Amino acid sequence: MNGTVEARPRIVLVGAGWYGQKYLDEMTSRDVGGDLAAVVDIAEDLEERYPVIRKKRIPTYRAISDYVLNPEKDADLAVISSPIHLHAQMILECLGQGMNVLCEKPLCLTEEETLSLSRAARGAGRFLAVGWQLNYDRAVQALKRDILAGRFGAPKRARCLHAMRRGNGYYARSSWAGRISVNGWAVYDSPFMNACAHHFQLMTWLLGPSMTLPIGVTAAEGELYRGNPGVENYDIAFLRFTAEGGVPICYYTAHPLRTKNLGQDALVEFERATVTWGKGKPFRAVTDTGEEIVYGMDGGTPLMQKLYDAVQCVKTGEAPICGPEAGLSHLNAVLMAQRFPVRDIPASRIEWLEEGGDRFPCVTGLEDALSACAESWALPKEKGISL
Ligand SMILES: NC(=O)c1ccc[n+]([C@@H]2O[C@H](COP(=O)([O-])OP(=O)(O)OC[C@H]3O[C@@H](n4cnc5c(N)ncnc54)[C@H](O)[C@@H]3O)[C@@H](O)[C@H]2O)c1
């Protein structure tokens, strides 16, 4: 698709905040196969925050438009880790400058924009990859190949529970955290949209019709709650979607809970096998004949494989496996969920935990409610659970 680059690709990191720092660390502490040519971020204290920038004499710019004015603006790859509502415009700017792009998830907030960004990349002869890291996992890719080959039969139903404790510090880190919109731009930030999005996106991607596409999501039911009163959007979600072919996909996630990490616990039932994975548990299929297939026992794929794959693709001219369409079903599910009403959890059911200089709202009984619903593929009202 794009021309190959024989030398070491030059990389620009756009957005060096909470997650962008992981890219910065990777590119400054390991050989990723390319070189970090510049960091673009509006923050004025970048060099103070990240001494490695000064130590390695990495040029910094406040905007992509400043970077492209410099005489050495020949980057081959832009890694974009900026707030969601800025992704689309930054992608177009970088493509327009001849760069390939690896953009953090979620790509953007409408299907129309997803498809138009995909077209823009094709038109520019460059790739647009998205940072859903589990899609780059070699165990996941091997599992998906087996699913596509029909080894387990058709999918019957899928579910996952993944909740992570997040306190006021998490929401205070940026202007878009927990918000429905910022300055008129939709962001729909929530655990389902953002921090705990990965395993839902992964389930849709695993069940998709090809190595690059997810299964479509056609309908949704659910219950949303707000446990942290300082959050504009919801921070607790019990969701049940219907995917193409009538496959139910249930997802349970939350931030205001006492347990730091609940899940990840995923289960997908097929006609002839059950597939499971979770925190500390491998991707594993057990067929109805009792055969066990464990994927990726070779030490695992690094979390930042997406960066290594993107650099490699710049060199070969191929496109990474996770393109704009890979997150489309997650996006459509987020948009469907966003239409549901959000109920405030009564203050009497919230205990505040103080730890490490942060304050965490903890909804009484939330862990039990999430686990009980996940176990029975149910929503709270169906189980007589009231939060
Ligand atoms: N893959 C993952 O596991 C994962 C985890 C967390 C976040 N993310 C994604 O990473 C992206 C960034 O999230 P975050 O939590 O790091 O956000 P953040 O708000 O902490 O960081 C964003 C950075 O972008 C900078 N920025 C803002 N406006 C800018 C502009 N106009 N030009 C240049 N820089 C600008 C900010 O100064 C900040 O440093 C989001 O898409 C998020 O969903 C992915």
Image (cartoon, rainbow, N blue to C red):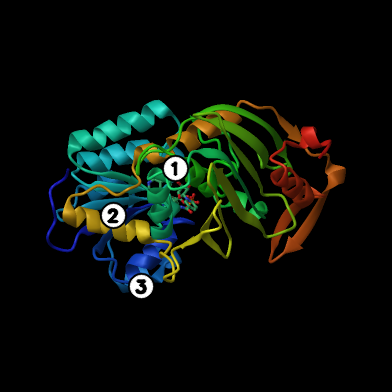
- Give the label, 1 or 3, closer to the camera: 1
Residue 29 picture quarter: bottom left
The residue tagged with tag 1: helix, strand or loop?
helix
Q: CA distance from mark 2 to mark 1?
A: 19 Å
Residue carrying label 3: 29
Q: Position of residue 289 (x, y in %)?
A: 54, 54
Q: Is residue 154 above or below residue 5?
A: above
Q: Position of residue 176 (x, y in %)?
A: 54, 42
Residue type, label 3:
Ser
Whichever of callouts 2 and 3 sits on the residue coming sooner in the sequence is 3
Q: Label 2: how many residues lie within 10 Å, few (<14), some (14-19) or many (20+)? A: many
Give the quarter of the figure containing the N terminus.
top left
Q: Foreground residue, 381 or 13?
A: 381
Residue carrying label 2: 310
The residue tagged with tag 3: helix, strand or loop?
helix
Q: Position of residue 154 (x, y in %)?
A: 49, 38
Q: Is residue 33 above or below residue 111?
A: below
Q: Foreground residue, 183 or 373?
A: 373
Confirm whether residue 75 shows in the render. no
Whichever of callouts 2 and 1 sits on the residue coming sooner in the sequence is 1
Residue shown at 37% from the left, 71% from the top: 52
Residue shown at 43% from the left, 35% from the top: 328
Q: Is residue 197 above or below residue 302?
A: above
Q: Foreground residue, 226 or 207?
A: 207
Residue carrying label 1: 205
Residue type, label 1:
Trp
Residue shown at 60% from the left, 55% from the top: 264
